[in-house]
Image: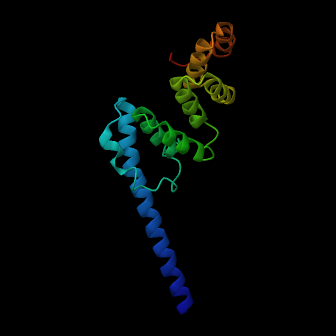
């Protein structure tokens, strides 16, 4: 009987800790999504990055990897290495939406590393060609490489889409 009580007590502690981590993550996600929605990435939002556990839960409430959202802040802040580290370490968090690959391609475009930008943007677009962001980033890569005819070919894949414009 004592073993069962100990087991219940241990499971209760684990559950309380997991709930605490989830609550901390939810509070941070609220701040991040407010910034994401407004397009205004505030320095004050980054104050909790050093103390929050990004491993649990590793995806946000909208299925975007949390480390990917945080990497965007580091990208805008000019800390590209930290952004790349976060993006590469969270590729498996939700590989189906290609958020990380698209952001890696966007950063490489910004840095002028065209071969890497094209590589990652092709991966993202090939996996989800109907995603406006992936189309936009691959188009930027083609423009920077002066491959204008390729923009026409990818546009043919998405032109019949019934979604609002980019």
Q: Choose top left, top right, bottom left or bottom right for residue 135.
A: top right
Is 76 situated above or below 162?
Answer: below
Instruction: State the residue at coordinates (53%, 92%).
Output: 2
Residue toward you, 55 or 85: 85
Left or right: 41 as drawn, with respect to 135: left
Asked if residue 61 shows in the view, the reply is yes
State how many labels appear. 0
Q: Choose top left, top right, bottom left or bottom right for residue 126.
A: top right
Q: Position of residue 144 (x, y in %)?
A: 58, 14
Is 122 situated above or below 3?
Answer: above
Left or right: 77 as drawn, with respect to 126: left
Is 60 situated above or below 126?
Answer: below
Task: Classify the position of the N terminus by image quarter.
Answer: bottom right
Taking the view exactly as shown, the residue that stands out farthest to the left is: 44
Asked if residue 129 shows in the view, the reply is no
Residue toward you, 6 or 55: 55
Q: Position of residue 17 (x, y in %)?
A: 44, 67
Q: Position of residue 7 (x, y in %)?
A: 54, 82
Is 147 situated above or below 41?
Answer: above
Instruction: State the residue at coordinates (43%, 34%).
Output: 78
Instruction: State the residue at coordinates (54%, 19%).
Output: 163
């Amino acid at each position: 009987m004592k073993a069962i009580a100990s087991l219940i007590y241990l499971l209760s502690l684990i559950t309380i800790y997991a709930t605490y981590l989830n609550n901390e993550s939810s509070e941070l996600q609220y701040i991040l999504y407010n910034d994401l929605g407004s397009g205004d990435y505030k320095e004050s939002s980054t104050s909790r990055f050093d103390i929050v556990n990004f491993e649990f839960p590793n995806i946000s409430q909208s299925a975007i990897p949390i480390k990917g959202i945080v990497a965007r802040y580091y990208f805008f802040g000019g800390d590209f290495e930290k952004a790349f580290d976060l993006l590469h370490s969270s590729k498996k968090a939700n590989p189906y939406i290609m958020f990380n690959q698209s952001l890696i391609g966007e950063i490489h475009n910004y840095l002028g590393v065209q071969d890497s930008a094209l590589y990652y943007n092709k991966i993202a677009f090939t996996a989800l060609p109907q995603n406006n962001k992936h189309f936009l980033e691959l188009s930027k890569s083609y423009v920077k490489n002066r491959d204008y005819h390729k923009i026409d070919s990818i546009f043919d894949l998405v032109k019949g889409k019934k979604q609002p414009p980019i």
